């Protein structure tokens, strides 16, 4: 990464988490630590600044020591609303995006997203596990802000549909698809904890 490219990171913790009994997923504990702490540990080493996108429990998220930003609307418009809010707040050329509920993601995985985007001079790099895209793992140029604003203003929310309109490159993680294990329910949380105790 050349020194001219300024990178901001955003952790998406702004969802309702209906399947998690409406608990705030980033604050739910995985192996004794809030899930967002894993995301922060992975993200902070590869970006110039970190933003946490949250729409509730703002004070609790502030305790992690990074700026907390909310969506531009209060209607829980999905991941793209968090990405747009980060683009508006970040003074950066590239935004590195990840969710708060994937505790197996490491710094080197995020570095790969940045590298693939830069090498291909693409507007967006998105993670691919060999079978499907993981559209909330992105390295994305902040110049797409207007395109994203227009998309959301037209009442569209689907991440993959908006990404398909961009100059996109896939970052291939097919050799380790398990890193994208994300936690949507309390059962998934305990299953992943057990699996990682064995590994």
Image (cartoon, grey):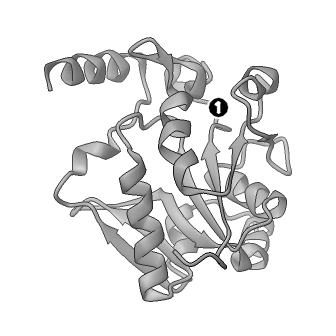
Query: Residue 192: where, in percent of width, then height?
Result: 28, 24
Q: Would residue 191 be found to the left or right of residue 100 on screen?
A: left
Residue at image location 79% in from the left, 77% down from the top = 146
- The answer to whether 11 is drawn above or below residue 191 in the figure is below
Kindly give the residue lying farthest to the front in the view shown. Answer: 3
- The answer to whether 160 is drawn above or below residue 19 in the figure is below
- Between 192 and 81, the residue placed more toward the observer is 192
Q: Would residue 11 be found to the left or right of residue 124 on screen?
A: right
Residue at image location 79% in from the left, 70% down from the top = 149
Secondary structure under badge 1?
A: loop
- The answer to whether 97 is drawn above or below residue 99 in the figure is below
Q: Would residue 34 be found to the left or right of residue 9 on screen?
A: left
Graded by Cα atoms within 10 Å as few (under 14), some (14 to 19) or many (20 or more), the crowding at tag 1 reads some
Query: Residue 15: where, in percent of width, then height?
Result: 64, 37
Query: Residue 172: where, in percent of width, then height?
Result: 28, 68
Residue at image location 38% in from the left, 43% down from the top = 105
- The answer to whether 96 is drawn above or below residue 188 in the figure is below
Q: Residue 4 occupies which quadrant of the picture? A: bottom right
- Between 49 and 157, the residue placed more toward the observer is 49
Q: Residue 152 occupies which quadrant of the picture? A: bottom right
* Numbered disc total: 1
Q: Would residue 73 be found to the left or right of residue 120 on screen?
A: right
Residue at image location 53% in from the left, 49% down from the top = 45
Query: Residue 151: where, in percent of width, then height?
Result: 72, 72
Residue that numbered label 1 is attached to: 16
Q: Quadrant of the C terminus?
A: top left
- Between 15 and 53, the residue placed more toward the observer is 53
């Amino acid at each position: 990464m050349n020194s001219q490219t300024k990178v901001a990171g955003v952790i998406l913790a702004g969802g309702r988490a209906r399947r998690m009994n409406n608990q705030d997923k980033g604050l739910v504990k995985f192996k004794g630590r809030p899930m967002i702490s894993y995301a922060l540990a992975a993200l902070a080493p590869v970006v110039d600044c970190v933003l946490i996108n949250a729409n509730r429990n703002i004070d609790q998220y502030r305790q992690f020591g990074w700026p907390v930003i909310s969506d531009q609307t209060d209607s829980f418009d999905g991941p793209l609303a968090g990405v747009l809010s980060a683009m508006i707040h970040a003074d950066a050329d590239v935004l590195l995006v990840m969710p708060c509920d994937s505790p197996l993601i490491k710094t080197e995985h995020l570095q790969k997203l940045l590298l693939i985007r830069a090498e291909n001079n693409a507007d967006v790099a998105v993670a691919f596990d060999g079978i499907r895209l993981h559209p909330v793992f992105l390295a994305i140029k902040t110049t797409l802000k207007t395109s994203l604003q227009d998309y959301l203003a037209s009442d569209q929310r689907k991440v993959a549909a908006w990404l398909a309109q961009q100059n996109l490159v896939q970052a291939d993680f097919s050799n380790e698809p398990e890193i994208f294990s994300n936690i949507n329910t309390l059962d998934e949380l305990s299953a992943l904890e057990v699996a990682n105790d064995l590994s």
